[in-house]
Image (cartoon, grey):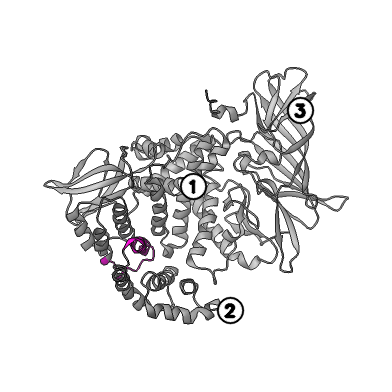
Amino acid sequence: MSAQAPTETAYRLPRNAVPRHYAITLEPDMAAATFTGTVAIDLAVREPSRSVIFNTAELELMNGTLTNATSGAVIEGDLATDEEAERTTFTPADTIAPGDYTLRLEFTGVLNDQLRGFYRSVYKDDDGGEHVLATTQFEATDARRAFPCWDEPDLKATFDVTLIVDSDHLAVSNAAVESEEMLADGRRRVAFATTMKMSTYLVAFVVGSLEATEPIDVDGVPLRVVHVPGKSHLTGFALEAGAFALRFFTDYYGSPYPGDKLDMIGIPDFAFGAMENLGAVTYRENLLLIDPAKATQAEMMSVADVIAHELAHMWFGDLVTMKWWNGIWLNEAFATFMEITCVDAFRPEWKRWLAFCAERVASYEIDGLASTRPVEFPVASPDEANAMFDVLTYQKGSSVLRMLEQYLGAETFRDGIRLYLRNHAHGNTETEDLWKALGEASGEPVAEMMQRWIFQGGHPQIEVGSDDDGYRLSQRHFQFIGDPDKRWMVPVVYRSSIGTDRVIVEDPVTVAAGDRFIVNAGGDGYYRVRYDAGLIDEVAANISELGAAERFTVVSDTWANVLAGDSPAQAFLTVVTRLSGEREATVWGPILGGLGELNRVVSSDNRPQLRAFVRDLVRPGLDAMEWAPRAGETDLERKLRGILIGAMGGLGKDGATIERARSMLPAVMAPDSDIDSEVASAV
């Protein structure tokens, strides 16, 4: 008989005693790669208790006492640590009566090299000298490696952090510096203000030879970029993007920024892209520091995306937090949705929602497999939550939210988000709490509609046919291989010559509409579309009249149906033939992606014809642009030039393009090259 798998309760601490406030003091020793610390944790003991249990990992506890907040009586007790369970039990001689107490502990730990907990980050300066930072990464359950704590997201508390550091080291934590004091041994004691009530995984501290930009005032919030010495010239774009995002989210959420300052900190050794610690957001350096004069549009967009994503979390994630790790999808999916909404406003010329179409396709490719998973699934151990940090959480989750926003209307959706944040500020939620707020704001059956989108894997395809009364819409489960049978409540937006309308498709439905009929109007639905043979010819004939996201989805959906065996390759070629004058870089993604796949499977006898097809398709756009940027071009126009050069010489094997690229290569590789970065990349 096999052992039963552990349930969530096996990883949850008892609730007989819960924290309200932590006062933490830490003294890192960089040279020895260790730290010492003390913590005083204000507790509410809810019932008569024989012990108090909390989380620790890789910490050595020296002693502990429990002080009654009312009488001042100090209770001694034994400390017993279960290393495997990452728990320590404080057991006094007598039963602890209900009431308020302070648990005081002294401990030591290791500044590890595992990029988690309180760890060492090593970097070299321009002269080759090695420097060490001490920094943190606590999500999901590594705060317990830095200080004893109740390391679960719903056990929120406030925090006072004090760091004792070398005199030449900068110290950063979640809140603003409240006081600094020079000690007799030459070190500094830096005390930070009390944080808002928050989860342990959001606590942060960073110490080392660092520099900070002068703070800029963002409507009362001091904003800085913290970085290793010598990189101040790379901070301007981050400050601009960060200031914009702070203002954007304050307005969108209808709620002030919940911290007292914001530091964005570039870390040389960082396992994640970034981490949303309240007021002290940590980033991998290349996702924060950038020179716009030398960067491609994609590189700048990536930095803006990550900054916006983390700042979106200050409200959605930090102010309101999931109850348990099964809810991590909502944190990340919503922050992804908000990052794109923000960056689209920050740089409208980047057409960020159009670019997101390509990211949505990445989730389609996984979600079309029989082995896909639901967006949300039961999580027992916190380690199991790591399985959620994937394309289905970020891209599918945010795609479903975007689809819902466009169906409900952007203002109605925003009203629901504001209601959700007001109702649950400083608290913890389940997924259903968001659907309830959105349903209340919209009057729509949001919870019922979203249930299957979140708790079953896969996605639907809307089948479009015509009959005497209009157009018939039905659904089937889209899957590349297999015999799927799942169903959804699909919020479909459609358009024709007589206007735009919407309908929920669960069972087959016929809608009355004019000609030039298009399903997934706007291109934001998380579903594939397959038109009957006659209708796809009509869509192809009028594709130039569609919006860019709609053109993208028609091409992408048609190619997906070719891969699934539901449409002939000729249907795809019929569509893309009409797009030889396409001016949107993003739309070229599925065009060239499909042609590239065909290039891999066609016979060698037919490959010259396919290459000629590519050249005929690409040449008009490339000839119109030429190879050198012109004054006034947008970043996306520069990007398009690089894409077309790459396609002409790569997939099209155009001899003249190849020769020109070869002749330019020495200039591209020169250290002082002034060739446009998009052209250089293509070359």
What residue sits right under mark 1 in the picture?
A: 390
SS for tag 3?
strand
Which amino acid lies under the numbered mark 2 shown in the image of this protein? Asp
Disc 2 secondary structure class: loop
Residue 291 location, x and y as percent?
A: 57, 68
Q: Residues at badges 3 and 1 in contact (C-beta under 8 Å)? A: no
Residue 207 in view, yes or no: no
Tell me which residue sits at (54%, 72%) in the image.
Answer: 293
Identify the amino acid type marked 3: Leu
State the CA–CA distance, disc 2 to disc 1.
39 Å
| Residue type pointed to by label 1 | Asp
Query: Residue 657 appears at what percent x and percent y?
Result: 40, 78
Viewer-side label of 3, 1: 1
Instruction: Write down the region rendered in magenta.
Output: 577-602
Residue 456: image quadrant is top left
In the figure, 383 relative to 274: above or below? above
**Mark 3 residue crowding within 10 angstroms, few (<14) / some (14–19) / many (20+):** some
Query: What separation in Å lies between label 3 and label 1 (alpha carbons)?
Result: 39 Å
| Residue found at x 61% / y 66% | 234
Q: Position of residue 139 (x, y in %)?
A: 60, 43
Marks 2 and 1: CB-CB under 8 Å?
no
N-terminal of the pair, mark 3 or mark 1, is: 3
| Closer to the camera in the image, 98 or 80 | 80
Please say if 28 is above or below 484.
below
Marking on residue 672: 2
